[in-house]
Image (cartoon, rainbow, N blue to C red):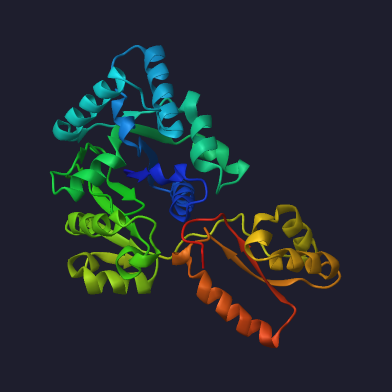
């Protein structure tokens, strides 16, 4: 029986602790273990200057390996800007490509030699060492397309870039990605929420609002939306009915790395070792006092806690979480709130 060929966009996996990148890694692993499926990872740049790299399409294998290594280096490290006449030349090349280049091909990556780069920079954050041999056997492809190109094109109402996905039955994107794909490829989009439109005050950049709306408008007719929850699907159906009609609900994936907390007495020690002392300054020493209490009393009895894991910023609803926790503490003084995450934006509250 012919295998279903699936192409998965891995671009957001370059962000180590992004929720969407996390689930994309788990999806790659899960689908690769399914019978009857042939899964391929798609890698491309997200920065404007990644477009300056020309992939080598000749037959010299060592030159192609060198070219692909340079491509990955630019995508991962973000290419530096040149100065003087070099800067002007780069700007002219970028403008020319942005205006005239709309078709993008896929090139198979020399995975036997370069998979370790993919594993360390894209995959290992959410996966286990035992997954390495399995995922190293998959194919990975690269492309000169960048997210900066399709973002600007859809915002300006220009023709969307075309990604040549011939040979693939399905392509899966982690969000509304405004690109055209080959006619034989079904386009699936993972849909999480409508925060940019419903909670615009929680965003870091106002430009996300316009892009969010235009990207859904561009994708609603040719894409199937896979919503993470019924609530997300209802929002999509209400505000974008044509996209909502083409939606299904599949909950988020959980990783096998999660396990029951069978040794709660070890948790206080873990918190102590990973405690961010800068928070003690921000909270007038209250977090430091809480840690001192934890170190003295936490290990002596069962440590009961609520765990919140995410970037610390407004759209994660931490203000209401703290309010709810205060009410819980009124009746139960022994429970703790443990927050794991780096500082995001608008953390003044």
Mark yes or no: residue 276 visible: no
Name above or below for residue 333 compared with residue 270.
Answer: below
The quadrant where residue 340 appears: bottom right
Give percent across and percent down for residue 214.
Answer: 20, 56
Judged left or right of residue 87, residue 251 is right
Name above or below for residue 183 compared with residue 210.
Answer: above
Taking the spot 28% from the left edge, 35% from the top edge, the residue there is: 145
Q: Nearer the viewer, residue 180 or 277?
A: 277
Q: Nearer the viewer, residue 279 or 169?
A: 279
Give percent across and percent down for residue 4.
Answer: 33, 46
Q: Residue furthest bottom?
A: 331
Taking the spot 24% from the left edge, 74% from the top edge, the residue there is: 238
Judged left or right of residue 143, residue 202 is right
Name above or below for residue 304 compared with residue 266.
Answer: below
Give percent across and percent down for residue 304.
Answer: 72, 73
Name above or below for residue 235 compared with residue 36.
Answer: below
Mark yes or no: residue 254 visible: yes
Q: Quadrant of the N terminus?
A: top left
Taking the spot 32% from the left edge, 70% from the top edge, the residue there is: 198
Judged left or right of residue 110, residue 165 is left
Judged left or right of residue 273, residue 151 is left
Give percent across and percent down for residue 322.
Answer: 57, 75
């Amino acid at each position: 029986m012919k295998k279903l060929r699936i192409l998965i966009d891995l671009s957001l996996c370059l962000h180590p602790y992004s929720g969407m990148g996390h689930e994309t890694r788990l999806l790659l692993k899960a689908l690769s273990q399914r019978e009857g499926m042939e899964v391929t990872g798609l890698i491309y740049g997200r920065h404007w200057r990644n477009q300056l790299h020309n992939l080598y399409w000749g037959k010299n294998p060592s030159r192609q390996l060198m070219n692909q290594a340079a491509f990955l280096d630019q995508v991962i490290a973000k290419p530096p800007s040149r100065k003087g006449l070099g800067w002007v030349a780069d700007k002219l090349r970028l403008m020319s490509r942005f205006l005239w280049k709309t078709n993008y091909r896929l090139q198979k990556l020399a995975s036997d030699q370069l998979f370790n780069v993919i594993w360390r920079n894209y995959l290992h954050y959410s996966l286990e060492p035992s997954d390495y041999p399995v995922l190293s056997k998959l194919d990975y492809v690269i492309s000169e397309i960048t997210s900066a190109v399709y973002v600007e094109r859809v915002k300006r109402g220009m023709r969307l870039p075309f990604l040549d996905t011939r040979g693939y039955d399905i392509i899966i994107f982690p969000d509304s990605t405004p690109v055209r794909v080959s006619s034989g490829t079904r386009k699936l989009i993972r849909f999480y929420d409508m925060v940019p439109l419903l909670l615009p005050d929680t965003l870091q950049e106002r430009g996300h609002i316009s892009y969010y709306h235009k990207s859904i408008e561009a994708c609603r007719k040719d894409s199937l939306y896979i919503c993470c929850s019924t609530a997300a699907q209802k929002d999509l159906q209400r505000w974008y009915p044509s996209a909502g009609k083409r939606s299904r609900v599949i909950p988020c994936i959980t990783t096998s790395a999660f396990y029951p907390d069978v040794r709660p007495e070890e948790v206080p020690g873990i918190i102590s070792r990973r405690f961010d002392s800068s928070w003690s300054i921000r909270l007038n020493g209250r977090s430091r006092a809480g840690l001192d209490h934890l170190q003295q009393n936490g290990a002596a009895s069962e440590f009961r806690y609520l765990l919140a894991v995410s970037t610390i910023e407004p759209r994660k609803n931490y203000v209401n979480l703290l309010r709810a926790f205060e009410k819980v503490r009124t009746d139960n003084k022994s429970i703790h709130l443990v927050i794991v995450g780096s500082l995001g934006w608008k953390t003044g509250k």
